[in-house]
Amino acid sequence: MKKVLAIGLAASLAACQNNYLSGDTSAHSVLPQGVNLIEEVKRQGDEIVIPYKKYQLANGLTVIIHEDKSDPLAHVDVTYHVGSAREQIGNSGFAHFFEHMMFQGSENVGDEEHFKIVSESGGTLNGTTNTDRTNYFQTVPVNQLEKMLWLEADRMGFLLDAVTQEKFEVQRETVKNERGQRIDNRPYGRLSETMSAALYPEGHPYSWPVIGYTEDLNRVDVNDLKKFFLRWYGPNNATLTIGGAVDPIKTMTLVNKYFGSIPRGPEVIDAKKPSVTLNDDRYVSFEDNVTLPLVFMTFPTVHARHEDEPALDILAEILGGGKTSILYKNLVKNGLAVESQVYHRCQELACTFNMLALPNPAAGKSLADLESVIRASFSEFEQRGVREDDLLKVKAKLESSAIFGLQSVEGKVSQLAFFETFAGTPNYIGKNIKRYNDVTKEDVVRAYNQYLKNKHAVIVSVVPKGQPDAVAKTDNFSIPQRNIPERTQVKMSNLDTRRATDSFDRSEQPIADANPLVNVPAYWETQLSNGIKVLGSQSQETPTTSILIKIQGGHFAEPVDKAGLANLTADLLNESTTARTNEDMSLELQKLGSDVRIYARDETINILVSSLSKNLDETLALVEEKLVKPAFNDIDFNRLKSQIIQGIQHARKDDNALANEAWSKLLYGDSIAGIPATGSVDSVSKLTVADVRDFYNNYVKPQDAELIVVSDLPQSEINKSLNRLTYWTGKGKSFNRTFKPVSFDPQSVYIVNKDKAAQSVIRIGKPSLKRDFTGEFYKSDLMNFNLGGAFNSRINLNLREDKGYTYGARSQFRASKNSGHYQVGANVRADATDKSFIEFEKELRAYRNHGMTNEELEFMRKAVGQRDARSYETPNQKLRFLGNILEYDLPANFTQKQAEIIQNTSLAELNSLAEKHLDIDTMAKLVVGDVESLKPQFEELGYKVKVIDLDK
């Protein structure tokens, strides 16, 4: 459950908040009949608030509107107060299943048209389901707002006649694929549902998984789903939240037009919050396809927005929140575990206090040993108590998170919708702030004594297959067999359907006004005295500064026999300096509410800095310290090296990681480009501290580094702050950035074996174009859009929507400045691997031979041509945009050139690019899956089969 907190930022935030007005519409306009203004919240002074107006329609629909004219966007969110907790025993997964069905067309929106309409409007969309709510949301250029309201209203009020058994069957397969990809075929994927089934009694709303059990999905038909919709999807159980460059009165007129006539649904009352009490510790376990065992401990606590929730959140931070926490010290720093976590997860009806750890094999400790350390850490907390810094760092961290969460209209709309749904008012941010500000040391200790000390827990052990004795303790609890009531057949004739009566033709799709003017971010350039190239932009929406530094020297700068060196060096730069331990460094950053992350890419070491602008100088002082005073001590080195090795071994159990590794090897062989950036177990095992120091001395230098900054501060202040980095000097060595692809056999299917895999990963492609922004790469990307670059692309509609083979399929040109490749692929059902491969082959051949249609060309032009309105909204989006300008030396008007290319490139030219680049007979074919079953299938298709052994 999302937590929002901001402390002490009011003055600076108020100074940066643009107060755009659309005129005093309340004085000159009248709300439509049947619409009531419930409340209006404005910023009165320096308080923390998201201004809004709250309305209610006669049918009970709650509407919240937030004006934000910083960008020509509109974000629309419809949240229904129904999740998996509202399902009946034996009907698990219905809420999530219906999320899928809501995208399959409605009475006035054709099959598979919903995604297409939003995409060609230049928008993005999605839906999510959790235990307590389901939401649907779109971000579009503001001229497309009416169309989005029409879409949402049509599926709220006119869905059921369009829901067919055929659509139901396809989406049931899609949901099964999603479960396979996210749970059944994923290491530790069944942990959450195992924990919930062991913690909650049978029939408790949280005792089954959100995605549901496969046997429940198999048991029902389309009428069961329609019954669920009619019970929970009424306007009186929904909140419509709209934010962006909108006029409230005009918007409410449209809302009332499209939603006002939809009949009210059954009344909905708040669900009960049943408490959970454990009389004994419950030990349960299961075997999984994992390398490392895991122990997970959970205690039942309160429920969301309970008075003790903030104290428990802070307790979780003290026990396991980062490098200053007790469990980090007792488990990770000393090498007993490769990872530990503590978090307090809150949902509407119940919260749990959770702790987990994965042992470091080098330490020789068992899950039982780790459980003992966790329990001993409780005693340590009792002796240690709560310190002032514990409260300060948590509150600063949450303050920073809250401010950064206000950088997008989506972020603000999401908060308003969330608080209205669960707190009964959108105006809850101030109350939430106060809840955390009021927490005292005594509150945290009391929460510990009340909910953790001497209390019982569920302890789940996840152990590698064939190692049942590795559990923390022998199971003393068995998850009860599910008692499924006898199913009653639901007949359509017995459903109490509702239908709106309108005075207009809903089948007419609204016509959008002219596209809004999109202003590309203005920027400035300079260069620091130590050779760092700087590109900056001012963005005054929030009092924050985001910086990305790209140092020339990454994975490609490593010798092959030292693969993983750049990654390890970057990780160590996140650790101790000669002036501070990593705990001290972490504490200083936490107290500032700042985040500094250093990581390796193929050609660069990147430093991503996020800071409140008021703390920028102090944050940059710590960045400078990391860069010029790294400790590279043996303790940090050995711990991180061990963690990386365990991560590499863990990745061998993940089918997507296997596919990534094999794909690089297939295209680039034994060069450094063909080896994972993390390296291999062999290469990382041989690395020394001296290797790290050499790499640092050779490459971590400022000359020719690139620094991109987006801040509310003016250039003069930014330049002054950046001068601190000029104490860092030197020029790094050059290195090879281009690699000749190796030969492969296009008539062979290369298979990486994963025994008894529930899904297979398919990759088809070849080395291709380097990245550009107005040349052949850019045009080829436009060409690919209808084949595999959008939800409504040919391959996704075929494999997901028509066949139900996959959760999603796509194709893309992936490239950097120096290399690139084309790739088609998906994670598919194991039993449909060969069928999926055949469909990929058909689609590639058809697209290459016949090209896209005129209708597809028009769709691409609309979808790609209008999406710029949402390309520069947040600081991180601006960082990416400006980073490309700096790295590729792009002219200031390159986006205008792109717009011309989109509109003027002919169908013939795009289709000639398809013919040139999409010859499947020249492409590599890779599959990760069960070789025993797959080999004869591909041989039957006429391919030779070659097995790739990634350990050789």
Image (cartoon, helix red, strand yellow):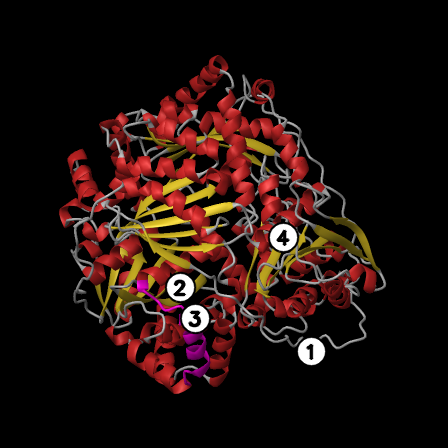
Query: Which-is-in-front pick, marks 3 and 4?
Result: 3
Sequence-first disc among 1 and 3 = 1
**Tag 3: residue type?**
Thr
Mark identifier at residue 832 = 2
Residue visible at 77% across and 68% down in the picture: 257
Residue visible at 57% across and 61% down in the picture: 71
**Tag 4: residue type?**
Val
Q: Circle 4 sits on which residue?
A: 413
Query: Which-is-in-front pick, marks 1 and 2?
Result: 1
Q: Circle 3 sits on which residue?
A: 895
Q: Dot 3 surroundings within 10 Å: few (below 14), some, or many (20 or more)?
A: some
Sequence-first disc among 3 and 2 = 2
Task: Residue 841: name its quadrant.
Answer: bottom left
Q: Dot 1 surroundings within 10 Å: few (below 14), some, or many (20 or more)?
A: few
Q: Secondary structure at mark 2?
A: helix
**Magenta span contains residue 897:** yes
Q: Secondary structure at mark 1?
A: loop
* Residue 417 picture location, percent across and down: 66, 50
**Tag 2: residue type?**
Ala
**Tag 1: residue type?**
Glu
**Magenta span contains residue 214:** no
Mark identifier at residue 714 = none
Query: Which-is-in-front pick, marks 1 and 4?
Result: 4
Which range is magenta?
Answer: 888-906
Sequence-first disc among 1 and 2 = 1
Q: Main secondary structure of the magenta part?
A: helix
Q: Circle 1 sits on which residue?
A: 508
Q: Secondary structure at mark 3?
A: helix
Quadrant the N terminus occupies: top right
